[in-house]
Image: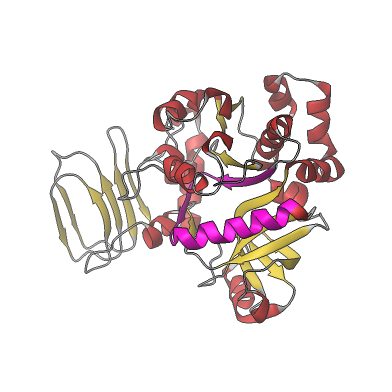
């Protein structure tokens, strides 16, 4: 039986712009079906949470315009467990909002805060690790994060340096955090991996609701003060700064602890993460999600997406590219995260607003 004092806040207010044009403002990636499980990222996050906390203690924090989508995808979720934000202000305000609401319900609450868009395998290992973290956080006034044992020098993830080096990251016991580094260069990431002192920052946090609010008051008083001044959530979000919990608290606190985690994990924030963790490459390395027929010749290691079952996708001589064909957009771009980011920044221009 799940501990009645355990809660989970699923953060589902992201816009998913990096996966444009599949992910749009009206239906961002956390609500999409990328995997063959038949479940969206949000639904999978809910199901993982329900393994660990009582279902009535699962809360989803999302934007107001996504309320209907959340209700459709999680009909079992009580309406009062959907916390609605006026604007996307990143994770620090979302976590503050969730912690405040949870603390009203239960002064002894211990909560998990997790993004909605992760891919996690080895669910038994995941549940065991998170339960250990919850048990620890329930008796220690510390801010716990799950650190993933890295498998490669990936520059798209944040890193956590731990005390104790290689031996420490092989255990499932709390380890003291030395430093946080957000998305280093590829060269620095390689040095991190060689040192054996670093874990990937999963963005999954565990703490007593009262403790995270106390640390927010200390390190991010501008956020907490808005909740003291008003009970109008729209007004709070209008005035609130946009900042992650990492920058607001975790990089400053002296209470940070990390649990090394061994389960397979991926933050679905880039096309490369999709290629590596969801795609099933064919014999030439192409990852495809195509409903109709296709004809490929001399093509290697591309990502190709088209859901029109009446369209033939014919490509020859293309390597390391992204091809996405939707009803109103055809995107062809190199499979290079820097180039993708630069390319998508052009969408901010007014003439492309209808396609966002």
- Tell me if I can see residue 59 in this picture: no
**What colour scheme has been applied to the protein in the rendered image?**
secondary structure
Residue 47, above or below 27: below
Residue 264 point in image, percent of width and height: 47, 64
Residue 342 point in image, percent of width and height: 50, 49
Q: In which quarter of the image is the C terminus?
A: top left
Q: In this rendering, would 16 be left or right of 190?
A: left
Residue extending farthest to the front is 1
Is 111 part of what is drawn in magenta? yes
Query: Residue at image x 53%, y 23%?
Result: 79
Is 301 part of what is drawn in magenta? no
**Nearest to the observer: residue 40 or residue 306:** 40
Q: In this rendering, would 115 be left or right of 44?
A: right
- Tell me if I can see residue 348 in this picture: yes
**Nearest to the observer: residue 270 or residue 110:** 110
Query: Residue at image x 61%, y 53%?
Result: 203
Residue extending farthest to the right is 218
Query: Residue at image x 63%, y 47%?
Result: 112
Q: In this rendering, would 265 be left or right of 244?
A: left
**Magenta residue span:** 110-138
């Amino acid at each position: 039986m799940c501990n009645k004092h355990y809660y989970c806040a699923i953060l589902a207010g992201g816009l998913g712009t990096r996966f444009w044009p599949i992910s749009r403002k009206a239906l961002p990636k956390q609500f999409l079906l990328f995997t063959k499980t038949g479940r969206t990222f949000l639904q999978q996050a809910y199901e993982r949470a329900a393994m660990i906390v009582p279902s009535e203690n699962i809360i989803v924090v999302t934007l107001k315009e996504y309320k209907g989508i959340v209700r459709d995808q999680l009909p079992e979720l009580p309406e009062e467990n959907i916390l609605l934000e006026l604007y996307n202000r990143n994770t620090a305000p979302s976590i503050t909002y969730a912690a405040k609401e949870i603390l009203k319900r239960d002064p002894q609450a211990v909560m998990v805060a997790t993004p909605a868009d992760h891919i996690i395998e080895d669910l038994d290992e995941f549940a065991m690790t998170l339960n250990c973290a919850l048990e620890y956080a329930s008796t220690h006034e510390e801010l716990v994060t799950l650190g993933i044992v890295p498998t490669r020098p990936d520059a798209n993830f944040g890193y956590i340096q731990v005390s104790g080096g290689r031996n420490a990251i092989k255990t499932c016991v709390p380890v003291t955090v030395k430093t946080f580094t957000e998305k280093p260069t590829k060269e620095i990431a390689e040095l991190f991996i060689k040192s054996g002192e670093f874990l990937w920052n999963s963005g999954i946090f565990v703490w007593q609701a009262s403790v995270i609010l106390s640390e927010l008051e200390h390190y991010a008083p501008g956020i907490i003060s808005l909740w003291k001044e008003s009970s109008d959530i729209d007004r709070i979000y209008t005035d609130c700064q946009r900042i992650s919990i990492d920058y607001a608290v975790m990089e400053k606190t002296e209470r940070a602890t990390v649990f090394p985690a061994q389960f397979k994990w991926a933050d679905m924030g880039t096309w490369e993460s999709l290629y590596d963790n969801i795609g099933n490459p064919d014999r030439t390395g192409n990852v495809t999600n195509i409903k109709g027929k296709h004809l490929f010749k001399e093509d290697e290691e591309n990502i190709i997406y088209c859901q029109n079952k009446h369209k033939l996708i014919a490509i020859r001589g293309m390597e390391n590219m992204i091809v996405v064909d939707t009803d109103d957009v055809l995107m062809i771009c190199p499979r290079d995260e820097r180039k993708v980011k630069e390319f998508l920044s052009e969408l901010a221009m007014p003439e492309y607003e209808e396609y966002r």
